[in-house]
Image: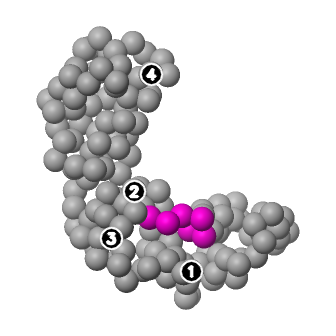
Amino acid sequence: SPVLSLRLAALFLNAPVNMRHEWINSLKMSNELRSQVLKLLETRNVRPEMSLYGARRFLVRYGELSDLAFELLSLTDFSIDEFEPFLHSVQKEDFPKSIKELAVNGGDLMAVGIRSGEGLGELLEKLFDATLRDPSLNVREKLLEMTKSHKEFI
């Protein structure tokens, strides 16, 4: 690959996990490149679920590095041929890539009676996960209804 971060990640892919950080940190590179290499190396320990949900989680996890992460994943023993159709399918979808893209925010949830604090963040995470499972749920009214009707969210 002409992409340096991918080449470096491939180089360290089978390195002992406890030595990777030390070896990578010993190289002269920008913080951004170092961060990208370390993020890509996470693919060694990640096995995406073979589903649309798993593909959406993969894209969210790796963001703009997802194409490189997929390429690096193909170098491992992961069943890439089974996962690729899911990945291609969700790349065409419109789904929230972060909590910020949810149709509701913390203020909306507090307006319907959710107290601010740690529980609010957990609720937003659960709503985000629900929209990754079913992107059609990312509608303000649906998310607020889920909040009201599911006591485990509160």
Given residues 73 and 93, the one toward you in this image is: 73
Q: Which mark is residue 76?
A: 1
Secondary structure under the numbered disc 1 in the rendered image:
loop
**Amino acid type assigned to the residue bearing label 2 in the image:** Arg
Q: Indicate the position of residue 40 as horizontal and vertical percent values.
A: 58, 68
Quarter of the C terminus within the rendering: top left
- Marks 1 and 2: in contact by CB < 8 Å? no
Q: Which mark is residue 119?
A: 4
- Marks 4 and 1: in contact by CB < 8 Å? no
Which residue is rendered at x = 48% and y = 18% of the image?
117
Q: Crowding at label 3, few (<14), some or many (≥20) Cα neighbours within 10 Å?
A: many
Q: CA distance from mark 1 to mark 4?
A: 38 Å
Compare marks 1 and 4 and give the one earlier in the sequence: 1
| Residue 43 in the figure: left or right of residue 89 | right
Q: Indicate the position of residue 31 as horizontal and vertical percent values.
A: 70, 60
Which residue is rendered at x = 56% and y = 80% of the image?
76
**Relative to residue 49, is residue 70 depicted above or below?**
below
- Marks 3 and 2: in contact by CB < 8 Å? no
Given residues 95 and 145, the one toward you in this image is: 145
**Relative to residue 66, is residue 82 depicted above or below?**
below
Q: Which mark is residue 87?
A: 3
Compare marks 3 and 1 and give the one earlier in the sequence: 1
